[in-house]
Amino acid sequence: MVSGGDGQQDAEGEVLSPEELDIEAQEDVAKLDEGRYVIGADGPPTNTDAAADPETTGGRGDPGAEPEAEPEAEPEPEPRPDVDPVDQISGGDVKRWLGDELSDHDSTYAYHISAKTGSDVNHQQLATDDIGSAFDGLLVWYARQVAGDTSVDEALGILLSESTVNVRYPTARLVAYLEDQELGPDDTIGDLVSTVSEEDGLVFPRR
């Protein structure tokens, strides 16, 4: 653009008047501050036009506002592996718990037993003041775990006869058996064997 007298010439050589050179006089121009203006896209500028001026708003639409610092991203918590509470219990914990529970019993004899037979696991708990009842309960429960289709009394007889532990029965139990079968001094050993065979084994009577 070239100067020319009281006005200036535009690119096509036409002379512009001083009024045309006064940018503040234009309807589509608004003054922001000294030497800074905003020109409306279609007519007089609006607040939206002013907010769109990156030099004025810092690119955010708030004149003169300082750029906000982006918040630091909090680190994501590390995933915690799924832990079964049962996996955290040790064998020592179980023993201490069983010991405490048995100690709380007022009975003279008490026990907890677990036995695995094949794929089956069974448990037995007993508390009593009778030592015979405690022993009977233990024998009968164990025989039931291993007997299968065999009766409990027969399973116990097999276990005892096959055991490496020799069982010594009191003579009084044999005498009680002979009396129960009505066998006396005049009967022979053959008579005793025959009686035992007929009974399918020797079973001492209860006291």
Image (cartoon, helix red, strand yellow):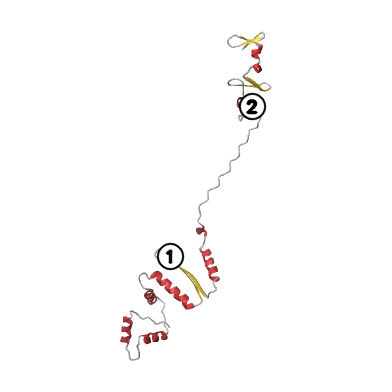
Q: Are there few (<14), some (14-19), or many (20+) residues within 10 Å of tag 2?
A: many
Displayed quadrant of residue 6 = top right
Q: Position of residue 5 (x, y in %)?
A: 66, 8
Check the image and report above or below for 120 versus 159. above
- Quadrant for the C terminus in the image: bottom left
- State left or right for residue 139 relative to residue 96: left
User: Residue visible at 40% across and 71% down?
Assistant: 144
Specify the amino acid type for callout 2. Thr
Q: Position of residue 10 (x, y in %)?
A: 60, 11
- State left or right for residue 21 relative to residue 173: right
Specify the amino acid type for callout 1. Val
Q: Are there few (<14), some (14-19), or many (20+) residues within 10 Å of tag 1?
A: few
Q: Position of residue 89 (x, y in %)?
A: 52, 61
Q: Which mark is residue 56?
A: 2
Helix, strand or loop at disc 1? strand
**Looking at this rendering, what residue extends furthest in the top direction?**
5
- State left or right for residue 14 relative to residue 206: right
The residue to which callout 1 is attached is: 121
- Judging depth in this view, the residue of 1 and 125 nearest the camera is 125
